[in-house]
Amino acid sequence: MHDNYTAIREEVAKLCQQYPGEYWRGKDRERAYPTEFVTALGDAGYLAALIPEEFGGAGLPISGAAAILEEIQKQGCNGGACHAQMYIMGTLLRHGSDTQKATYLPKIANGELRLQAFGVTEPTSGTDTLALRTTAKLDGDHYVVNGQKIWTSRIEHSDLLLLLARTTPRDEAVKKTDGLSVFLVNVNDALGHGLTIRPIETMMNHSTTEVFFEDMRVPAANLIGEEGQGFIYILSGMNAERLLIAAECIGDAKWFIDKATNYAKERVLFGRPIGQNQGVQFPIARAYAQMRAAELLVHEGLRKYEAGENCGEEANMSKLLAADASWAAGEACVQTHGGFGFAAEYDIERKFRETRLYQVAPISTNMILSFVAEHVLGLPRSY
Ligand SMILES: Cc1cc2nc3c(=O)[nH]c(=O)nc-3n(C[C@H](O)[C@H](O)[C@H](O)COP(=O)(O)OP(=O)(O)OC[C@H]3O[C@@H](n4cnc5c(N)ncnc54)[C@H](O)[C@@H]3O)c2cc1C
């Protein structure tokens, strides 16, 4: 991590200030995609942060992307509308062919193509990715895809979908982790030709959907890397995803702590600011301590990632602790505001709903604890 990205953070903050609470409340009420915000971020080059300069991106290391996403959340905006573009990219960057990179990366970098959708989770397999049932069968120079995904977020606002599907039946795979493959699907070509999208209404505004594939044809040229190695490719991107989501949670926590602190200083009851009462101070102070500890672990994870070291432990634990910190900060913020914490115009209830997601997605708390228990502490494998 070469610096704290102060200049980038300031620029991102300035951009975010053009999209105040009122903007997000409107989108939340209508469950509408924040197209203007995402376009502005793309135009300013932030969504291409991780694309190498030779392909038109900023070529920043992952800590740069983390700084951008943290700042977006800290300003009260919602990076969930576009964060996947940062981490999905890694699969294409690391495992795509030269032709694929030359075809897609410059267009993603200049905003012509949006790579915002990631189709891994299925209704029956959930967290058990190796049990997924969507199949892709080679037929001439195309793969024919059949199956279903769930929680495929932002696909209605994306030109490309990174799809994980089974190319070898599970019982025929040599290794347990073999047999899944990654494809880059052109959403516009596929819509109405085997691809159906059905939006899911959720607790917060997240543009998530169910996706159905019926004989959807994907050119074989859109297979990423080697057939059958897709699970490994997806896994290799997960540490990056966890660190970036953790950075977002840190941003959320900072937003909540700031709101709570300011309100606790201003709200006067019984002749003194409510923040003078330790019962009000302590939950905010505790959330701050939790946030700082998680932030340090995020930085350590980013450092290890950039040094090419194994950061699995830090990536997982920082996601766990940062999501806990943002939740604790959200809870303290609602409580400090009393009844006003529930009023939409304060934005707290909206952020409270938004940050709750990160205890479940992209990886739920139990699965992280299970990783730590087994891979860090050497406890017996539980599943
Ligand atoms: C709003 C939203 C957006 C999402 N976006 C995407 C996306 O864009 N692309 C995508 O592919 N997926 C996406 N997801 C899916 C998300 O990654 C999954 O919801 C998450 O991984 C959990 O899977 P699941 O919902 O099937 O829960 P399940 O796997 O059914 O698990 C249910 C509960 O059981 C627990 N559990 C399961 N097995 C164990 C075990 N062995 N030990 C202990 N506890 C266990 C889990 O921790 C969880 O609490 C999204 C989800 C949501 C809600």
Image (spheres, rainbow, N blue to C red):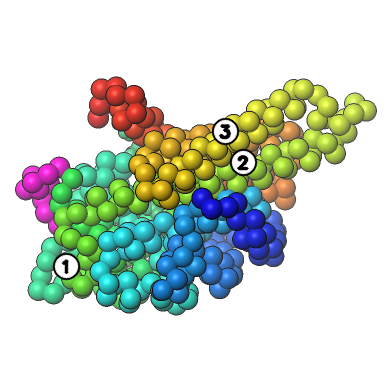
* Magenta part, dominant SS: loop
Is residue 171 located in the magenta-colored stretch of the structure?
yes
The residue pinned by badge 1 equals: 143
**Disc number for residue 368:** none
User: Residue 28 in the image: x percent, y percent?
Assistant: 59, 56
Query: How crowded is the residue under tag 2: few (<14 C-alpha within 10 Å), some, or many (20+)?
Result: many
Q: Amino acid at mark 2?
A: Ala
Q: Amino acid at mark 1?
A: Tyr
Q: Element type at marker 1?
A: strand
> In the rendered image, which quarter is residue 274 located in?
top right
Query: How crowded is the residue under tag 3: few (<14 C-alpha within 10 Å), some, or many (20+)?
Result: some
> In the rendered image, which quarter is residue 227 located in?
bottom left
- Range shown magenta: 167-176
* Residue 337 as seen in the image, left or right of residue 137: right
Query: How crowded is the residue under tag 1: few (<14 C-alpha within 10 Å), some, or many (20+)?
Result: many
* Residue 48 as seen in the image, left or right of residue 189: right
Mark closest to the chain's N terminus, 3 or 1: 1
Q: Element type at marker 2?
A: helix
User: Residue 172 in the image: x percent, y percent?
Assistant: 6, 48
- Residue at position x 15%, y 42% in the image: 176
